Image (cartoon, rainbow, N blue to C red):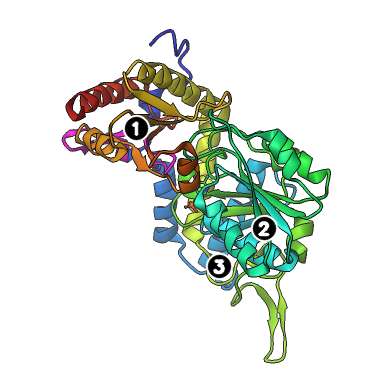
Amino acid sequence: MEAVITKKIFDSDKVRKDFPILQRAAGGKPLVYFDNAATSQKPNSVINAIGNYYKNYNANIHRGLYSISIEASEAYDKAREKVREYINAREAREIIFTRGTTEAVNLVAYSYGRQNIKEDDEIIISAMEHHANIVPWQVLCEEKKAKLKIIPVNDKGELLINDYKKLISPRTKLVAVCHISNSLGTINPVKEIVSLAHEKNIPVLIDGAQAVHHTKVDVRSLNADFYAFSGHKMYAPMGIGVLYGKAKLLETMPPYQTGGDMISSVSFEKTLYNEIPMKFEAGTPNVEGAIGLGAAIDYINSIGLENISEHESALLNYATDEISKIEGIRIIGTAENKASVLSFVVEGLNALDIGIMLDTSGVAVRTGQHCTEPLMDWFGIPGTARASFAFYNTIEEVDFFIDALKNAVRILK
Ligand code: PLP
């Protein structure tokens, strides 16, 4: 163990105390939460920020002239500014609050897509996309009689960049790929992907759902045209997410939903739309979610993304070494550049049975297709068991998981 983590990156015991749920048991055993790629746990500071909003200044925003509405509006706008700073966007108006990554991708597909994609056009995605970054494009292509092109992966679960280069054609109108794969952990070379598309003036959407809390994302340096992510995977509440878009693109795009807040004037003859970002935030927004997301960003910054990444890599490397010693294990996703996702199958066993057995030991892992059915088909497997680590996880928990897994394999075989 000492050989793996040579220095104490931060005080795990102290950090774990910030997360009330990590103090509970599951099935009479301490909870070992390894399903962080599905959703993360929430620190007290996030829970308290939401509680504080409801206890002290709950009001609808941008409408009231009274003090608690002004306070709520300021907190909402401040959260947008925190997101801007976190991903280094040029302007806060380039940050659109959505329900999550799924809604952010749908927003681009419905608004930008319906405006710009025409018959016989092509959209490039990759073989490792989450359904959230497949289905909106598929529906758009069906509607417009356009084509979906798929960047293939190799056996390690890495994108084949030469094939991507060959897929780019004069008909390509958009590229949409994930930054980090949720089922393999592969970190894609998104900067290169963006730059290759830009050589042909093709805009790129990056699905950053698995990336923003693991690694520093600088949208200006990536030069992505759109970048989507979900709050709940980065220690913030559910139901809040972000679409970053370059202002010059967002300004030309039609609204995705219509109603209150997204307008500047309405008459029965004509409606004038609001400026960005409000143009894309119709109706009462998720104020508590945005405030919670702001608190989560403060929390991440207090730990430091570099520390988070370093600790998570150490957990991944250690878990990979240990799991590889178990007979019959096959790791799915062995890319050179990987985030803290460990997907695996055990020869002759069903991943679901492994998940159920691990749960009896208090270990929460995800099993199944992880919303990446085409990728599972490509690997020729029905699904995997997936352990995904966050910075609050420990080497001791990995040891516990490995023992529980060995036990499960012994009983099931
Ligand atoms: N994209 C990736 C890579 C994901 O991992 C997920 C969720 O697991 C999504 C998109 C969808 O995110 P959400 O359900 O929060 O909208």
Q: Is residue 221 left or right of residue 13?
A: right
What label sits on residue 325 in the rendered view? Answer: none
Return the x and y of residue 201 as percentages of the image width and height. Answer: 82, 50
Give the amino acid at mark 1: Lys
Front-most of 45 and 329?
329
Magenta-tinted stretch: 21-41
> Camera-side residue: 88 or 107?
107
Residue sitting at 79 percent across and 58 percent down?
248
Amino acid under label 2?
Lys
| Residue 108 visible somewhere in the drawing | yes
Residue with the mark numbered 2: 147
Measured Cα–Cα span from mark 1 to mark 3: 33 Å
Give the residue pinned by disc 3: 61
Task: State which tag comes first along the sequence, 1 or 3.
Answer: 1
> What residue appears at the point 35 percent right and 24 percent down from the top-left corner?
329
Determine the secondary structure under disc 1: helix
Work out how far the residue at label 3 is from the one at label 2, CA to CA, in angstroms: 42 Å
